[in-house]
């Protein structure tokens, strides 16, 4: 029965490429959202802070699958149709952006106060202080937890098959319908996710050691 998996391996690998694309696009957008929300939480006005808190609690309190269903079934009734691929990327990014916002917020707060004081003593304030002193150090500190969040994001992309978006999980389901070999096929799907997440995990470990060495 291993021949079934080998015969359909090209289709699984094609689905894996789509999964990587969805993961990379969603992670990049989620990172931008996370940094923006973290900065608004720390330095925004009261109204902006309240809005970010609502966003964080909603995103972290509602399952990703429900958000995907809302995008796929509810948005068209409002006249908004962003397409399955773009909609999936946006929903995943909004969902995991809430978690990344906490990662970046904690990283900014983890920059030693001495660094802030030294920069102010040199005449750096506001955006100059953030861009030159705080943000570079915060991004280095946020590296390992950011990668861990990306691992969860990769596994979260498997849910987009529920709304008809084709990727490695959907490819596995299509192969099973033809071959009736779920154990072998979904074993291959699991192996694809494992390889992607394992590589990210090793990269996160490397970043963690690098950050510890720098400090």
Image (cartoon, helix red, strand yellow):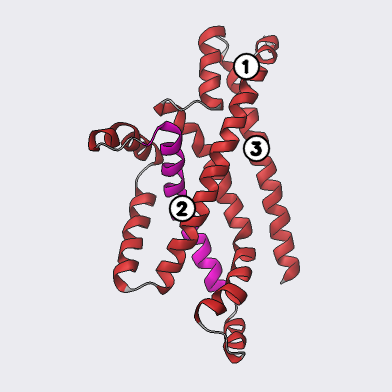
Residue at 28 percent across and 33 percent down: it is 76
Q: Which residue is mark 2?
A: 97
Residue 190: x, y in percent?
Answer: 60, 28
Q: Can you say whether 57 is above or below 6 in the image?
A: below
Q: Which residues are magenta?
A: 82-111
Q: Which residue is mark 1?
A: 184
**Residue at position x 50%, y 32% in the image:** 158
Image disc number at residue 109: none
Label 2 or label 1, whichever lies nearer to me, is: 2
Name the one closer to the observer, 80 or 70.
80
Residue count near mark 3 (Cα–Cα under 10 Å), binned few <14, some 14–19, many ≥20: some
**Residue 42 image point, x, y percent:** 43, 72
Q: Are marks 2 and 1 in contact (CB under 8 Å)?
A: no
Question: Which residue is painted at 55% across and 75% down in the image?
Answer: 130
Quarter of the rendering occupied by the N terminus: top right
Indicate which disc residue 196 carries.
3
Tag 2 secondary structure: helix
Q: Residue furthest left?
A: 77
89 with respect to 191 (left or right): left
Measured as percent of width and height from the top left, residue 93 is found at 46, 47
Task: Give the quarter of the figure containing the C terminus.
Answer: bottom right
């Amino acid at each position: 029965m291993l021949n079934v998996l080998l015969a359909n391996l090209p289709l699984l690998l094609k689905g894996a490429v789509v999964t990587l694309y969805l993961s990379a696009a969603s992670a990049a957008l989620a990172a931008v959202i996370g940094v923006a929300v973290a900065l608004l939480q720390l330095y925004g006005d009261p109204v902006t802070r309240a809005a970010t808190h609502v966003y964080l609690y909603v995103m972290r309190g509602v399952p990703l699958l429900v958000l995907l269903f809302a995008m796929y079934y509810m948005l068209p009734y409002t006249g908004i149709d962003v397409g399955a691929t773009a909609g999936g990327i946006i929903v995943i990014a909004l969902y995991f952006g809430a978690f990344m916002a906490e990662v970046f917020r904690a990283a900014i707060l983890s920059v030693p106060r001495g660094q802030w004081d030294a920069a102010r003593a040199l005449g750096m304030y506001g955006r100059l202080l953030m861009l030159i002193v705080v943000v570079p150090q915060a991004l280095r500190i946020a590296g390992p937890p950011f990668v861990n969040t990306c691992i969860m994001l990769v596994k979260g992309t498997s849910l987009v098959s529920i709304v008809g978006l084709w990727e490695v999980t959907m490819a596995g389901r299509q192969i099973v319908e033809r071959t009736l070999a779920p154990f072998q096929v979904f074993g291959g799907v699991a192996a694809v996710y494992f390889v992607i997440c394992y590589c990210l995990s090793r990269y996160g470990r490397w970043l963690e050691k690098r950050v510890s060495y720098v400090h």
